[in-house]
Image (spheres, rainbow, N blue to C red):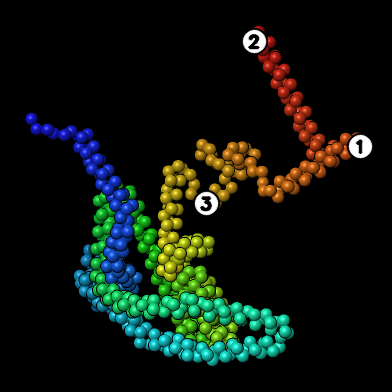
Amino acid sequence: MKFRPDKDQITWSITGIITALVVMLLYYVIFKGGHIISGIHSVVNGMEGIVTGLVLGYILSPILNFIEQKILEKIWEKAGAKRDENGEFRYKQLIRNIAIIITMTLVVFVVWAFLYYIIPQIYQSIRDIIRNIPMYYRNIDRSINRFMESSDPATINTVNTVADQIYIRVNNFIQEKVLPNISEIISMVSVQALNVINVFFNLIVGFIVAIYVLNAKEGFCGKGKKMAYAFFREDIANEVISSSRLVHTTFTGFITGKIVDSTIVGILCYIACMVLDIPYPLLIAVIVGVTNIIPFFGPYIGGFLGGLILILINPLSALEFIIFVIILQQVDGNIIGPKILGNSTGLSSFWVIFAIMLFGSVWGFAGWILGVPIFAVIYALISRLTDYYLGRNNLPTDEDTYIDTAYIEDGKFHYLGDPNSTKYRAQRTGSSWSRIFRSKHKDEHKRSHKDSNVTGTKLPIEHSHVTEDKALSKDKTENKNAEGADVKKDQE
């Protein structure tokens, strides 16, 4: 007779195999974790071109949609093309291909203009600044000497002491840190040069991948929805798809809006620098525009860096620039930004700062830019999950409802300050200051009560009320006892 294991035996066998595999995996992770990390790092490095293409395609998708839907389809309709029963044109793929060609041509043109016009001017500005450093140093030295000539001896001694300390520290830094590590610095520069070649290769691969992503983006969305409905219940799949839409709208709204906003700010800064005759206008405008992408801190960083460069050249130009940047950021924060971005993240200023500090410490510059939309998505998902469970418990989702709530019992809200709210420490004793003043107030009442007993004066009104309340309470107790005695007598 053939042995046939029953259902329990099969279940226990599978459980034992899975447990053994998990134990082996944990052992390998604990004692051989370095190999796993290096393997993941190698895979990530090999996928940099693919990731670059996915990101580039995602960023270019709104531009493609605008060209395809707002321009080409309108031209197609005016040419007499008809839509089918699904609302699609017969030559939809041809329209998509033309839109992709136009989009990628725009990208190539922008990159070419950046490399051909902007980069050389920025390089020229930086080279001039470095070349003129001795002149800037002489100007600063002349200003310091002029200041010291008009100062008293004590101030001169203080300035000389501070200058000597700065010189000693800079000299020690060069002797101890820079010169011994000069070979490592040269090797680091060589590695960075090789990284530039690697980045260029990844950009080419990413450019090709982005074309495929733009061409088949609807197909990717369809496959994702298909998998969601295949592996999850209908309601869970709907929530997964809804959350994906939330991620998409938050990221596209924030990133594209920030790019457009920062471009406008950079152009306005360039025009103002040209009008005010501020040195190196293109370099200053690029610094202000690029740093403006960083939420909250970006404008301050751009203003500080631009002012630092200009103060070496011309302090008056630096002052004009700082005043202009303050005005520009007020215009951007109150007019330009809200018009373009709106409330795309839904975060308060506190959470924006929190997200920048958190993700910036983890991912650096990329975390400063992407931290806000990532945290906005996490915040929105947690809020939706919270509202979902509150709805299941038949509780309101309005946040203001819970501000003065002491506790909820049997679906009924009990509020702070309500005499009927007697549980869960709802009757707050107040802060330490209020307790101090209340105890002082009680001491004054005790003294006044003692004085009134000595002099035979009447009690204060509030004490008389307390006495009357006690008398009434005593009368009620006696009445209840009398009624109880009458009832007992009737029963007998």
Q: Nearer the viewer, mark 3 or mark 2?
A: 3
* Residue shown at 31% from the left, 77% from the top: 194
Horizontally, is 439 left or right of 270 in the view? right
In the foreground, 27 or 345: 27
Marked residue nearer the N-terminal end (1 or 2): 1
Q: Nearer the viewer, mark 1 or mark 3?
A: 1
- Inter-mark Cα distance, 3 to 2: 57 Å
* Quadrant housing residue 86: bottom left
Marked residue nearer the N-terminal end (1 or 3): 3
Q: Is residue 277 visible in this depiction of the protein?
A: no
Assign the N terminus to one quadrant of the image: top left
* Quadrant housing residue 256: bottom left
Q: Is residue 200 above or below residue 357?
A: below
The disc placed on residue 491 is 2
Q: Is residue 10 visible in this depiction of the protein?
A: yes
Marked residue nearer the N-terminal end (3 or 2): 3
Outermost residue toward the top in this view:
492
Outermost residue toward the right in this view:
455
Q: Mark 2 and mark 1 in contact (Cβ < 8 Å)?
A: no
* Quadrant housing residue 412: top right
Residue 328: x %, y % from top left? 53, 78
The disc placed on residue 399 is 3
Residue 48: x %, y % from top left? 30, 69
Horizontally, is 247 left or right of 464 in the view? left
* Residue shown at 52% from the left, 51% from the top: 399
- Indicate the amino acid at tag 2: Gln
Label 2: element kind:
helix
Structural crowding at the residue carrying mark 1, measured as other residues with C-alpha within 10 Å and reported as few (<14), some (14–19) or many (≥20): few
Q: What residue is pinned by disc 1?
A: 455
Label 1: element kind:
helix
- Inter-mark Cα distance, 1 to 2: 53 Å
